[in-house]
Image (spheres, rainbow, N blue to C red):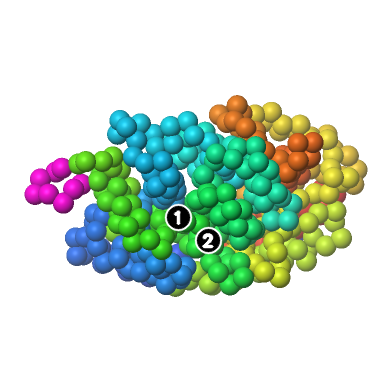
Amino acid sequence: MYDKDNKVKAFENKIWLASPTMHGDELKYMKEAFDTNWMSTVGANINEVERITCEKIGCKYAVALASGTSALHLAIRYAAIRLYGEPQPVSKGVLDGRKVFCSDMTFDASVNPVAYEGGEAVFIDTEYDTWNMDPAALERAFELYPEVKLVVVAHLYGAPAKIDRIREICDRHGALIVEDAAESMGASLDGKQTGTFGDYSALSFNGNKIITGSSGGVFITDEKEAADKIRKWSTQSRDNAPWYQHTEMGYNYRMSNVVAGVVRGQYPYLEEHIAQKKAIYERYKEGLKGLPVSMNPFDEERSVPNYWLSCMIIDREAMCPQSRTDHEASYTPQPGKTCPTEILEAIASLNAEGRPIWKPMHMQPMYAAREFVKASADGIDVGADIFERGLCLPSDNKMTPEQQDRIIEVIRRCF
């Protein structure tokens, strides 16, 4: 584990944050698409991905799309038309300046579709319990902006939000939920899968997700009318006519039958991947015992995460000075203390990949002018605090226990 200078040895092959894990079935279904010449956006693989998604997630309808972002976009567009009607002219965004409540600590793909439709995101602060949208902050947001009727909620790093509480608040205020379950496929709250709490939901098969198609996503709903509409929109909204006729806006968002072959081959391994990710999380939790840190949290009595990424947060009193600009980070070493920047440098020295926690949306330059709601006006900015003290650890399910031990050792040495 150590070199002649008593440094932890670097890995010969890079340990990634989260990379695809292929099993062989994927190639079989891709080859089937090739051999039968079904290379476009129709075919048996797409049909099977939609069927298996409904079976695994517990929804009535699934529409296979090009990405999780396209699924979110069409979910937001459909929800907005349901709330506000068709835009006039047709090229105008459906939201047309209306506010939408959005998770703050997430990847920007969660909220960019609001801007696609001309909406104005209002970011809802995070809670320490799950690192997801704070129901108390959402309640306060409705007091400030009672006219809002759409909420976009993400489940961060595979841990379910308090989505049942969020659902109750939204129902009371007559608001629809678009649920971003891109990171949480296979996770559940009280035995119910994430992706089934929203009025309309999205899954992702991006290359780093718990199962992958290299790309791809799925729109989820229990409404046949919604599924039919999204399926039409995703293929350029071609009308049922003998020529190319279009009466509404369409998109090139349908999943390829080749990509669907990869997803189809991955689906049988979802539970295996979750078990591997859980073992990684538990090894970090055990290996970091005694340090002033804790792992990314979840409700251990009610929720079952998919453990997509293992993350940690450093206790405030154990933080050394750290400085971040929009594009760079630095720190001042102090004995017995550390910070995410130092730990990420140490992990990188092993030829392994870690990353900072998602930078909250209200701190992003492109969204800095948007409104941000905390649980109380004078309360702490929870998302900014987690971003300051937290980091994502190498969580690749092909990482061996011995490799993980080296990563744990280099983290311990930072203290």
* 26 sits left or right of 176 in the view: left
Residue 126: in sight, yes or no?
Answer: no
Q: Position of residue 166 (x, y in %)?
A: 61, 55
* Residue drawn at point x = 57 percent, y = 42 percent: 101
Which one is nearer the viewer's eye here, 122 or 30?
122
* 278 sits left or right of 235 in the view: right
Q: Secondary structure at mark 2?
A: loop
**Residue located beneath label 1 in the image:** 200
Q: Secondary structure at mark 1?
A: strand
Residue 377: in sight, yes or no?
Answer: yes
Q: Quadrant of residue 255?
A: bottom left
Return the mark for residue 197.
2
Which one is nearer the viewer's eye here, 110 or 197?
197
* Local crowd size for mark 2, using a 10 Å CA cut-off: few (<14), some (14–19), many (≥20): many
* Residue drawn at point x = 40 percent, y = 56 percent: 219
Return the mark for residue 235.
none
Q: Which residues are magenta?
A: 238-245
Amino acid type at image mark 2:
Phe
Examine the residues drawn in magenta and state their main secondary structure: loop
